[in-house]
Amino acid sequence: MRREDCVELFKRIPETSHPQVNLVLRNQFVLSVDSVVRFEPTYLVFRGREGGTTDEGRAFFVPYEEIGYVRLERVVRLGELKQMYGETGYVDAEDRLSKGETQEDKADAAKLALDAKTPPSSGVTSLDPASIAKQNLLDRIRATRATVAGMSKGPDKK
């Protein structure tokens, strides 16, 4: 892949989707991109990880000629792809099915579901996935401790 092709491609992919980009090298080795740092004349500089590992935050300096292709590691609607190339107004079957709710409606529904699930004393105020997961884990630990404490008293020891 040439530098110009790589730069143009990354401009077309929304920046929010960059962490879902995988670079597949000519030898079929996969590199997952976290964020692009620089497009140098002969190589690309980015932070990410090797495919199949959990070692995040590594720096990669990859020559453009070693990049075989770029892959988005998620389901992409046809309308989304056409939007990346400036085509607007295209609506496919997937878009029609999801037209019923907007992104704001989905966010509001997710917040309402979270509020219904989370007890008022838990203090979760953000929709950050990490804080939600942490709070869910803490709730499960508390519930398990309460169950174990109730079992240790037994029926005669109340």
Image: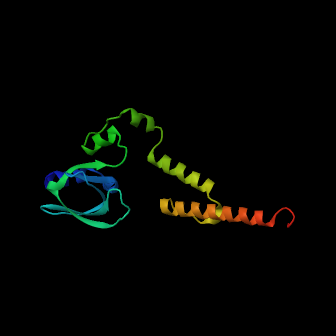
* Extreme residue in the right direction: 156
Q: Position of residue 32 (x, y in %)?
A: 31, 57
Along the horizontal axis of the image, is 46 left or right of 96?
left
Q: How many marks?
A: 0
Q: Nearer the viewer, residue 66 or 121?
A: 66
Q: Position of residue 117 (x, y in %)?
A: 62, 55
Q: Position of residue 124 (x, y in %)?
A: 57, 63
The quadrant the C terminus occupies is bottom right
Any part of residue 12 in sight: yes
In the image, 107 versus 139, the foreground residue is 139
Q: Position of residue 35 (x, y in %)?
A: 30, 61
Q: Nearer the viewer, residue 42 or 157?
A: 157
In which quarter of the view is residue 48 placed?
bottom left
Residue at x-position 26% and y-position 54%: 29
For this view, does 18 lie left or right of residue 129?
Answer: left
Q: Name above or below for residue 98 compared with residue 68.
A: above
Quarter of the view holding residue 138: bottom right
* Residue found at x 27% / y 45%: 84
